[in-house]
Image: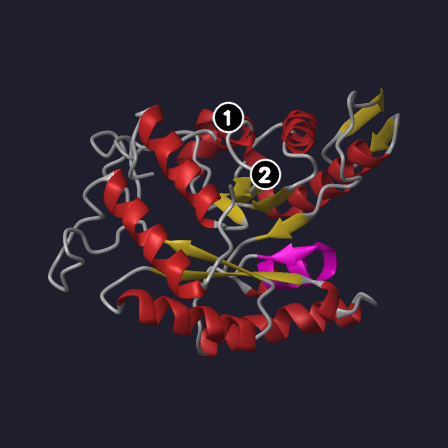
Amino acid sequence: MEFGGDVRDVKAWTMVANECGYDHALLYDHVVGADETIHQDWWGAYNVRTPFHEPMVLFGYLAALTGMEMLAGIIVLPQRQTALVAKQAAEVDMLTGGKFRLGVAIGWNPVEYQALGKDFSNRGQRIEEQVAILRQLWSERSVTFQGRFEEMPGVGLAPRPVQRPIPIWFGGQSPIAYRRAGRLGDGWIPEVYLGPELTEAQSIVNQAASEAGRDPETIGMQGRVRWGTGGVSQIVDDIGRWGEVGATHVAINTMMAPSGEWRQDAQTGLASVQEHVDVLHACADALKLTPRR
């Protein structure tokens, strides 16, 4: 998000992350932002000026630069066409050699739903039907599906992905979202950090999995740590704590991190791609990652 539209910065960050030995890259999804001069009651964390790259397109570009796994964390699935997401995800999975996880959630932004011509009010119901369709399209040559919201009249993808089906990981920050992840997800992406909220969320996910006849231990968990004033030592400590609570993956988030010499009083994000790269190098060294050549 902080790199803007300069492809050189995106490429530089990706190449360094790959060379340092990081396992995966996590990208966020927003298609449009709201103009606050028109939506005067706007309260969201981003707006019409906030840059977001389109994840599926960018994944295709990154696949040519890196051997890392890609994670969409998350695609707002109900505001997108199901068959098109299936096609895009299959292509990313093929281009990455089967190193792709599709993170999905229902989102929170009615303005974005309106711009994409989708119903905001029933998004929670629709996502479950969408997930069932995605898995069928990735796994079966021909799919006929008649649901409450979607109809597939004998259609199929070609080529199909390497992973059949592609792993689906659920985001979200509510008891309903946690139960959905436990019932349906190959993994889940907590929107909360280490502490009591995570403990409560994890218990809901695990209970829902058990009630659905699933083993909670088979459901992956994507942790995230923030770069901040605690520096490398805090990153290492927080990653260790995520491991202790059962995270199978952990991402390092440098967005909105203190800039310059990572001063405690800094109010903006890291000032340049070079500062993001410096953080990647510092954390990789501390974590003793194996560099790629």
Q: Which residue is drawn at 51% across and 55% down?
A: 290
Q: Residue at x 52, y 62 (%)?
A: 174
In the depicted structure, whether residue 224 falls above or below residue 65: below
Mark 1 secondary-structure assignment:
helix
Dividing the picture into quadrants, the one containing residue 28 is top left
Which is more toward the observer, 227 or 77?
227
Q: Residue at x 41, y 30 (%)?
A: 53
Residue marked by disc 1? 61
Indicate left or right for 248 with 268 as reference.
right
Q: Does the magenta stretch include residue 51?
A: no
* Badge 1 amino acid: Tyr
Label 2: few (<14), some (14–19) or many (≥20) C-alpha neighbours in 10 Å: many
Q: Give the range drawn in magenta.
A: 177-188
Indicate left or right for 239 with 135 as reference.
left
In the depicted structure, whether residue 62 falls above or below residue 271: above
Dividing the picture into quadrants, the one containing residue 123 is top right
Labels 2, 1: front one: 1
Mark 2 secondary-structure assignment:
helix
Q: Which residue is drawn at 77% across and 36% down?
A: 133
**Outermost residue to the front:** 293
Residue marked by disc 2? 77
Residue 43 visible? The answer is no
Q: Magenta part mainly helix, strand or loop?
A: helix
Pinpoint residue 19: horizontal percent, then vertical percent: 46, 43
Indicate left or right for 8 with 223 as reference.
left
